[in-house]
Amino acid sequence: MPLFTDGKAQDAKDEPGDLPEHLIGPFSEEKRKIDANHCDLKVFTDRRFVGYWVLWASFALTLPGYAQNDSIALETVVVRGFVPEKFMSGLKIQAIDSASLTQLRFQNISDVLSAFTPIAFRNYGPGQLSTASFRGTSANHTAVLWNGLNINAPTLGQTDFSTIPVAGFDQLSIQYGSAASIVGSDAVGGSILLGSKAPDKPLSVTAGAQRASFNNYQVQETFRYFTHLNEKWEFSGKTAVYNGKMNNDYRKPLRRGYLLLPTETAQKGIVQDLFFRAKNDREISAHIWLTDNNLVLIPDDEMGREMTRTTAYRTMLRYQAGSLAMRTAWVRDIIDYAKGDLSRPDHSVTDKFASRIEKDFMLNLGDNVNPVSIKAGGEWTHYRSRVPGYAQSPVSENRTDLFLLTRWQPTARIITSVNLRQGLVTGYNPPFTPSVGLEYGLVQKIRYDLKIKGSAGRSYRVPTLNERYWKDLGNPGIRPETGWNKEIGLEQAFRRAIGGSLRTSATFYHNRIKDWTYWNPSSGFRVENLQQVLARGIELQLNYQRQIGFWHTGLDAGYAFNKSSQEKAYDNYSQDVVGKQLVFVPEHTANVNMFFQYKLTRFTTQFQAASKRYSTSDNIQFLDGYGLVTLIGETTFRFDEFRMHLQAQIRNVTDTFYLNVRNNAMPGRSFALSLTFSYDSQ
Amino acid sequence: MKMKKQLASSLAVAFSAALLWSCNQSDPAPKGDYVSGVFVSNEGNFQQNNGAVSFFPRERTTADLDIFAAANGTDLKGGVQDYTASEKQGIILVDNSAAGQDRVQFVERYTFRDEGTIGAPDIENPREVAIAGSKAYVSCWGTNADQKYSTGYIAVIDLTTKKVTKKINVANGPENLVYNNGKLYVGTTQWGAGNSLAIINTTSDEATSPISTPGIANPVGIDANGKLWVSAGDKVLRINTESNATEATMTIATGGTKAVGNFAFSNDLKSIFFVLSWFDDAFKEHGATYKFSISDTQIAVGTPLIPRHFSGLAVDPSQGLLYGAVSPSYTQAGYAVRYRTDGSVVDSIKVGVIPSGFFFQ
């Protein structure tokens, strides 16, 4: 009576431990097996997949400029955006300014997010797997949207942030807290919004390269163009290519006796955006993002090396005519994993076909009352996945979402949103998902604003394809996770304080997630809806900008406290876990970015800190807290339309010692130098 | 699955005797924080490389969770596969998730201070360690890149120089070790295809003719009559150590779905404990611990000694208590649960993550 019919022999003793992560990881196939032939119950853990849970991120790098902090800026957001941020009233949204993105153009998104937000990353090492814990939730609870489309890998339900280079997008916003009624599944802890921006200058060309310590380098070229096709239509676009290699040739193999794991990461990609816009508010745009990230652990060990290659083809076609918008997209996620012999990797392919249609309405409530903005629409997504570890191949799944979003500003002081969504998924349905948001202007003066805002909403997460279809350990009957997120915050803005503008915000949130899935070791690692987690905390942010003559200074600072704990006992020994902080979620995080700029020369100091991160769920082990400082100096030389930008970074200036999830050392002080040439026709 | 506890206990007997003897020679009493008590090997969570050796004096009910870190200010940086000690040295087998990072860690036996390591390529995927005279024998899978467990070796370590002097090839992933009277008996991993028990002559350090077994073999230990006991699949064999002939074969009723493992000898070497475990249709692991006498003609699995399963099992030679290791999950502390030999529980002590082996000193 074999319960499992397949699986490679593997030792339980050797790498049993990580099974949950491995399965969350795209290919892990550790499993327990009852082997009838040997009249013997065996633990099968396929080591070939084990190292899977390994991808990347550069941690040692860091950040720049300043960020706009909140939703005050929101109201000026062009409604033409890909994500209906307009309906997110009551929620906290942080837009990262383009200067900051430009400053970190050769780095990965995790570097930007670490510098400007309290998002904690669970990092396996430089260039390796890096997943987000947003407001104390798990890696599955952050939605990553590219031009409005969720690009979390459907097999894993998460994004490896080390595979998302800053070069891949033009705009970055962070939306805090659940926004499932607007975004859909995965938006439990928050959402990362990546966007393409239509150029408005005839021609600009940028080409640059960065050389960093440890024989690491990046190159990229970007072309942006704009033209009037005729009296009615204009055309613009962007073509970008990026290519990089982290060789991580550390001078010494150890720091304080801890290994600097030898790894190599090669990353390359192409971005193509095309926009056709007509004066009568019609727009057609096409977006392509091909990206490839290849990580090899211990590359010099021909027997023991492990390769994880993550490739994504993302394509999208969008059409807007007045208040009607349509979008169709095809995304293919490919993951190849191999150990030893890298020529024949295990190959998994997932296709996602997603279409969306939405229409805006205005509901008039009378002559003396502002109308209500309404957006109604639907999304249809088809998944088709071939994964070696699945019980059947291919598997397919359909998901449909219907939504109704509203925004109403009855008076100058009040903005409110009520949003509704119902998801429909093959086999079962996630819960009806409502949310309500309210913003109230307590003080509205010329030089000072004080606003209170709050929201409450349901969230959900549709189980990943791995959770449903993984052979034996997946659970086709697993339920979607559901949560209720409540938050309230104060925002104030001084338009003239200490010679500049000052914004501060404080937000308290309370997010309870039920049916939290868990690869349960005591059930042979089968995935179950076992846990219930309460994440609550407070976030404080401050942004200061001052510009006088040629001098420009800015300060961005954030502090977050997060307590995120398991609430429910599910077996005898889970008593040791109840009430304890979730693993690798620091209780305290802080980030500071400060710059001084004179004319075209800027000095930036960045600081990011995290308190200790527990590495076991009962909190008996932890990795020490740490703080990292990065210094960036840069200047630009102008020659008519040409510019040359020179930037130097000192990362981990204080040579701080800290450890990653693998209990391996992170690099000490390192340097990066970049040179970028640009031509701008205006 | 693992019988290292039995090995550890038999070694501990020898060491206790040696200690006693040396005390009689009026040597100074050993000094250190870890002179007398129970050492627990904790494998940790593989990718987190967070194994540890926990320690507690027998009279205590709380353990020091990571004594290597306490003594040296840095942790072991890998899972702990086994721990044992020679006269003065403790030997820890450290298994890191990255290839080429495994090692044998030597420590001062009573203070646990770092006394050097042996790493790759001498040591790759170490499994168990046994001591014979001035040599230590470490079973290793080798790199095992193809995941087939077809090869492997025994690393012979000269404890004086702390160097590997020889690698003796053993097919099919060598695993559990029992040393007796000039012979090292070597079992193989259940993931390999071995159906024989390898024997190494520890004088010449050469492999001699193996003993064929009706299943994947692992040595359990030597009983009160000098006979070797070996588990092989669902069979338990009694073997004459002179002739290598199998004198008795008993079958453990597994119903085709249960796994047999964690054998341990009682202190009088006349009884053997073992764990029978299985998964139900909901993938929940169940199991129980049984006991049989070396004079039994069949092994009854009707009424268990203890109605639960363990990730490690051993008998303390000095107090005779049975120690069962409990591993609730890979991300939280396990427990050492102490039982009297009649199966009644004494107490439990929180130890490290995935406890699997005990060493008594």
Image (spheres, coloured by chain):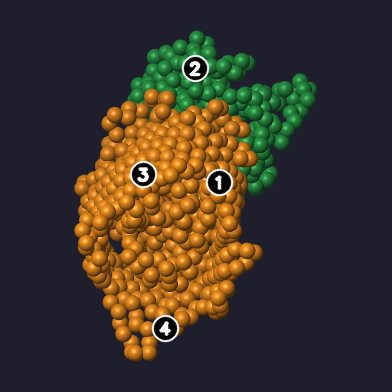
Q: Amino acid at mark 3?
A: Val
Q: Nearer the viewer, residue B349 or B317?
A: B349
Chain letter of the orange region: A
* Relative height, residue A485 to residue A104 (above, below): below
Distance, label 4 to label 3, CA atoms, is 46 Å
Q: Amino acid at mark 2?
A: Lys
- What SS does tag 1 mark? strand
**Residue, x 33% and y 41% (percent of image)?**
A241
**Foreground: disc 4 or disc 3:** 3
* For marks 1 and 4 on the same chain, the one whose residue lies earlier in the sequence: 4
Res. A298 in view: yes
Amino acid tagged 1: Thr
Image quadrant holding the N terminus of chain B, namely: top left
Letter of the chain that mark 4 sits on in the rendering: A
First in sequence: mark 4 vs mark 3: 3
Q: Position of residue A71 (x, y in %)?
A: 47, 68
- The residue that disc 3 covers is A205
The chain ID associated with circle 1 is A
**Image hue for chain B:** green
Judging from the image, mark 2 belongs to the subunit labelled B
Name the quadrant containing residue B255. Answer: top left
